[in-house]
């Protein structure tokens, strides 16, 4: 009788352990999905800024058609990406194209002083910061979840209930080089007025010498 009670107690403990572990996996998977939703929201916010940015630059550099088409194509590919893996693949070309768009803007002082352009830059800079923050949270959440999926003995529960490792949101090494080559955008002077022209008149050029006086006869 005592042996039966011990066996029942062990079975109950095992079932409780499985239940607790299963619930932890469910919570971890939900946390990963929530963290990715935050990243996806910020990515979409950035994509929504791009058409206005392109239109503003195009108003000053309409002949740079190739750059505008590249940005538009990269944006469409990034928007159609499904999940972290595809988004990671699309991120490199999109960031590189965006960098080339800002490189074009660097050649037009009037554009860099345009208030609409400055506001778009400021909003984009803020969005990039939020993307980086959301991506760090997501990748940290994925790392914790994947550790449980792969570590013993929780990997047994993961195998029984078909929990799989989540995907990180990263830029592949081949595309990191592409992004690294893209011109960096300096947002440090956003919102500052362009330097005013000096009101001090430039010194007058010396008068040209007049014709020599005729020699006295």
Image: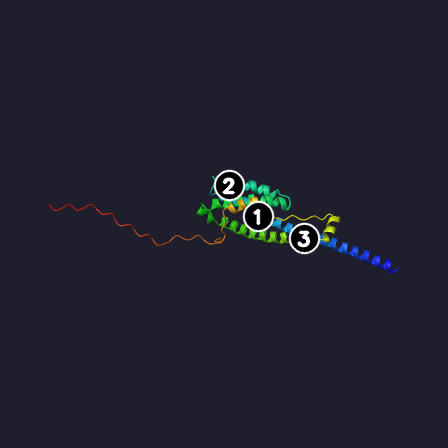
Q: In the drawing, what numbered circle is on residue 147?
A: 3
Q: Nearer the viewer, mark 2 or mark 1?
A: 2
* Left-right relation of 117 to 167: left
- 82 to 11, vertically: above or below: above
Of the image marks 1 and 3, the number of the one nearer the N terminus:
1
Q: Report x, y in % for residue 59.
A: 48, 43
Distance, label 1 to label 3, CA atoms, is 31 Å
Q: In the drawing, what numbered circle is on residue 31?
A: none
- 62 to 204, vertically: above or below: above
Indicate how the structure is coloured in the image.
rainbow
Residue annotated with mark 2: 67
- Please say if the residues under marks 2 and 1 sit with CB atoms less than 8 Å apart: no
Q: In the drawing, what numbered circle is on residue 46?
A: 1
Q: Residue furthest front?
A: 3
Q: Report x, y in % for residue 76.
A: 58, 41
Q: Nearer the viewer, mark 3 or mark 2?
A: 3
Q: Report x, y in % for residue 142.
A: 65, 51
């Amino acid at each position: 009788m005592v042996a039966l009670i011990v066996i029942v107690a062990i079975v109950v403990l095992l079932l409780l352990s499985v239940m607790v572990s299963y619930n932890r996996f469910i919570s971890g998977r939900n946390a990963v999905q929530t963290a990715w939703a935050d990243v996806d929201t910020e990515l979409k916010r950035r994509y929504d800024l791009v058409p206005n940015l392109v239109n503003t630059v195009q108003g000053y550099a309409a002949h740079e058609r190739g750059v505008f088409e590249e940005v538009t194509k990269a944006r469409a590919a990034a928007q159609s990406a499904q999940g972290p893996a595809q988004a990671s693949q699309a991120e490199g070309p999109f960031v590189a194209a965006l960098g080339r768009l800002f490189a074009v803007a660097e050649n037009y002082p009037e554009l860099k002083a345009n208030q609409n352009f400055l506001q778009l830059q400021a909003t984009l800079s803020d969005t990039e910061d939020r993307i980086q923050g959301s991506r760090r949270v997501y990748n940290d959440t994925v790392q914790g979840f994947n550790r449980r999926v792969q570590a013993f003995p929780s990997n047994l529960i993961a195998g029984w209930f078909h929990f799989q490792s989540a995907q990180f949101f990263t830029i592949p090494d081949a595309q990191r080089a592409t992004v690294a080559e893209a011109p960096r955008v300096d947002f440090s002077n956003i919102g500052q007025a362009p330097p005013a022209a000096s009101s001090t008149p430039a010194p007058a050029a010396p008068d040209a010498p007049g014709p020599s006086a005729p020699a006295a006869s």
